[in-house]
Image: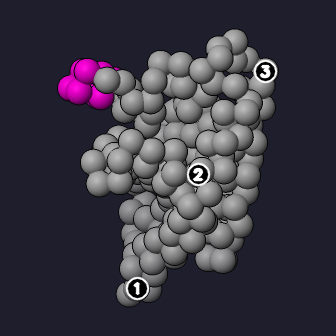
């Protein structure tokens, strides 16, 4: 979506558009690292599981930046969060056990929402379909990957199912919030056109 808007705003140079999109991707990754920490401070230890604060920026990133950068944002967000929290707080978030699963799941979130990116520029309502599809596919593949690869008692399919249920408020917030923010950004950027 953002690529189309930038072209529409007169940024014909691909180098310039890539630079702008890279800066926005870095900003989204920074949000994805910061939001969980803020959620834990304000809402307690279970805030990450309940509100999915890292997922929201990744979903938004895919919608704005497209599938390729959506995957990059999705994979790098938990990895950067892990490195940041380990280095500065001494306690990695997510845990090393959960890190590869989150990288995979959030990569899927970024990919799926990004696949809708070009269509959203023409039909804003598709951002809701993108959010719903991303949540369903991402969470289902997370559960499937745990069923296939987890050899730990700390992350079992039953634990994942309970976390998915606990995460319903965050999923609903994403389902409504990410599309509305995407539509608002689109309207603001195309305001004078």
Residue 117, image x and y in percent? 61, 60
Which residue is the site of mark 2?
167
Magenta residues, as a range?
83-90
- Give coordinates of residue 81: x percent, y percent: 37, 32
Q: Is residue 85 magenta?
A: yes
Q: Which residue is mark 3?
A: 148
Numbered disc in front, either 2 or 1: 2
Question: Taking 115 as reference, is 182 above or below it?
Answer: below
Quarter holding the C terminus? bottom left
* Camera-side residue of 174 and 15: 174
Q: CA distance from mark 2 to mark 1?
A: 35 Å
- Residue occupying image coordinates x 73% and y 17%: 149
Of all residues, the one furthest to the top in this rendering is 151
Q: Give the image quarter of residue 184.
A: bottom left
- Return the residue at label 1: 191
Secondary element at image label 2 = loop
Residue 13 visible, this angle: yes
What's the residue at 58%, 51% (across, down)? 167
Measuring from the top left, give residue 162's x and y in whole percent.
66, 42
Q: Position of residue 105 (x, y in %)?
A: 62, 37
Q: Quadrant of the N terminus?
A: bottom right
């Amino acid at each position: 979506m953002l690529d189309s808007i930038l072209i529409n705003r007169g940024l014909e140079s691909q180098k310039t558009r890539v630079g702008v999109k890279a800066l926005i991707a870095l900003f989204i990754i920074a949000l994805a690292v910061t939001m969980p920490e803020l959620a834990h401070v304000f809402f307690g230890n279970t805030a990450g599981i309940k509100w999915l604060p890292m997922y929201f920026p990744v979903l938004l990133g895919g919608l704005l930046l497209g599938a390729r950068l959506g995957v990059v944002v999705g994979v790098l967000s938990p990895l950067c969060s892990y490195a940041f929290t380990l280095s500065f707080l001494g306690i990695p978030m997510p845990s090393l056990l959960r890190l590869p699963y989150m990288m995979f799941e959030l990569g899927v979130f970024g990919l799926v929402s990004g696949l809708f990116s070009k269509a959203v520029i023409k039909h804003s309502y598709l951002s809701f379909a993108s959010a719903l599809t991303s949540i369903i596919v991402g969470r289902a593949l997370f559960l499937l990957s745990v069923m296939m690869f987890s050899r730990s008692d700390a992350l079992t399919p039953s634990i994942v199912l309970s976390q998915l249920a606990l995460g319903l408020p965050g999923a609903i917030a994403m389902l409504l919030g990410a599309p509305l923010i995407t539509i608002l950004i689109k309207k603001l950027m195309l305001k004078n056109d």
